[in-house]
Image: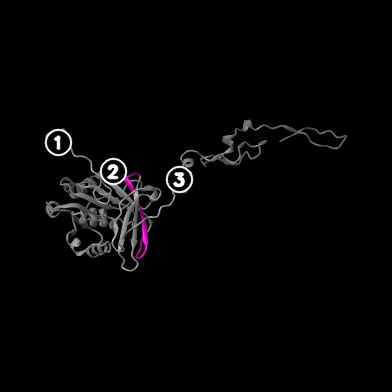
């Protein structure tokens, strides 16, 4: 391996300005994207919707499928409103192994594709014989699948999954952390309301990473889906989060000839947000201000600290600090007590 010659960054060929997203206010030209989320989060549906809008804008799209199959992919595209002419322009591949030689160059770059979608990362890693938990294998995957397209200016969308435990997801997809470092834009999807035939659904889109920095943070927007009860045609729109106002990208509702409108409601803080400051350090005070026992009583009983860890009272109140005093005893007249009783 050699470093090669030093490059002159002052050269005009490197003076490339940053451009906003080209498709649906989400996807940049020539950048590496990742869409991650749990099952039933409309990841493939959103990717196909973006592909269809890119085709209608005059671009050629390649779709590398490891999950759905050609029949399911065509059905989803037709539900989204794709025509036969639009379906013919898609470069569809049902891969069963890693690219060999100049496969990506000959079959995707030379035909003029501007966008390539890989659905999904788990199948691509398995077909390549790689482990998505290993940093070295993640680099090999990027070298085989993503970087050849990126060098030739083809934008890529890698569909990925997340871990089961929602508390451990954060901004990462399932697997090694190097997955996040190898992309330019990472969008996370989570279903608020799942869609079925004849109903509507709502998907929350979050910006986990955005190097060009054109996308809003932390929430990209709300993806609204609607399925026609009769024709099952799917229309979708991407709007700002429900607690915000303003513009946003909206796909035409071709089935009804109208544009979808997402109802807006005043944002309310969740239960977690209302109690987050207390959970991060502002511990709840005890109900009683005086925790010390009276006259040695309750000396062996445990009390709870603000952090809810039981603390024995022997440690909180030393025995020497518990004072005693003589207690007079009432006796009949004429009799004298031999001694004073002590508690």
Crowding near pointer 3: few (<14 within 10 Å), some, many (20+)? few
Q: Which residue is mark 3?
A: 273
Q: Are marks 2 and 1 in contact (CB under 8 Å)?
A: no
Which residue has dot 1 on it? 12
Q: Is residue 92 above or below residue 154?
A: below
Q: Position of residue 306 (x, y in %)?
A: 53, 39
Mark 2 = which residue?
214
Kindly state the secondary structure of the residue where label 3 is placed. Answer: helix
Magenta-tinted stretch: 195-217
The residue at the point 43 percent across, 52 percent down is 265
- Taking the view exactly as shown, the residue that stands out farthest to the top is 320
Q: CA distance from mark 2 to mark 1?
A: 24 Å
First in residue order: circle 3 vs circle 1: 1
Q: Regarding mark 2 in the picture, which secondary structure is present there?
A: loop
Q: Residues within 10 Å of mark 1 (few under 14, many from 20)?
A: few
Residue lying farthest bottom?
230
Q: Are marks 2 and 3 in contact (CB under 8 Å)?
A: no
1 left or right of 232 in image: left
């Amino acid at each position: 391996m050699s470093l090669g010659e030093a490059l002159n960054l002052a050269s005009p060929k490197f003076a490339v300005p940053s451009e906003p997203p080209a498709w649906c206010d989400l996807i940049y030209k020539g950048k590496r994207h990742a869409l991650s989320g749990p099952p039933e989060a409309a990841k493939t549906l959103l990717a196909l919707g973006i592909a269809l809008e890119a085709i209608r804008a005059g671009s050629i799209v390649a779709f590398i499928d490891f999950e759905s199959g050609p029949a399911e992919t065509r059905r989803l595209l037709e539900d989204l409103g794709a025509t036969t002419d639009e379906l013919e322009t898609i470069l569809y591949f049902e891969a069963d192994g890693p690219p060999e030689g100049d496969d990506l160059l000959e079959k995707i770059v030379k035909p003029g594709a501007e966008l390539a979608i890989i659905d999904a990362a788990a199948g691509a890693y398995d077909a390549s014989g790689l482990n998505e938990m290993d940093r070295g294998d993640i680099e090999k995957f990027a070298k085989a699948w993503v970087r050849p397209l990126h060098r030739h200016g083809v934008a890529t969308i890698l569909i990925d999954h997340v871990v089961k435990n929602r508390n451990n997801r954060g901004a990462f997809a399932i697997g090694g952390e190097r997955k996040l470092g190898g992309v330019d834009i990472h969008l996370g999807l989570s279903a608020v309301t799942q869609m079925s035939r004849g109903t509507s659904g709502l998907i929350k889109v979050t910006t986990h990473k955005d190097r060009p920095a054109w996308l809003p943070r932390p929430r990209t927007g709300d993806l609204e889906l609607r399925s026609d009860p009769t024709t099952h045609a799917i229309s979708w729109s991407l709007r700002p989060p429900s607690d915000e106002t303003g513009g946003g990208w909206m796909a035409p509702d071709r089935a009804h000839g109208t544009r979808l409108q997402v109802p807006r409601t005043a944002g309310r803080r969740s239960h977690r947000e209302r109690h987050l400051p207390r959970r991060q350090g502002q511990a709840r005070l005890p109900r009683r201000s005086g925790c010390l026992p009276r006259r040695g009583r309750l000396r062996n009983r445990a009390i709870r600290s603000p952090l809810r860890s039981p603390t024995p009272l022997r440690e909180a109140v030393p025995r020497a600090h518990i004072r005693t005093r003589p207690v007079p005893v009432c006796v009949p007249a004429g009799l004298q007590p031999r001694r004073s009783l002590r508690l």
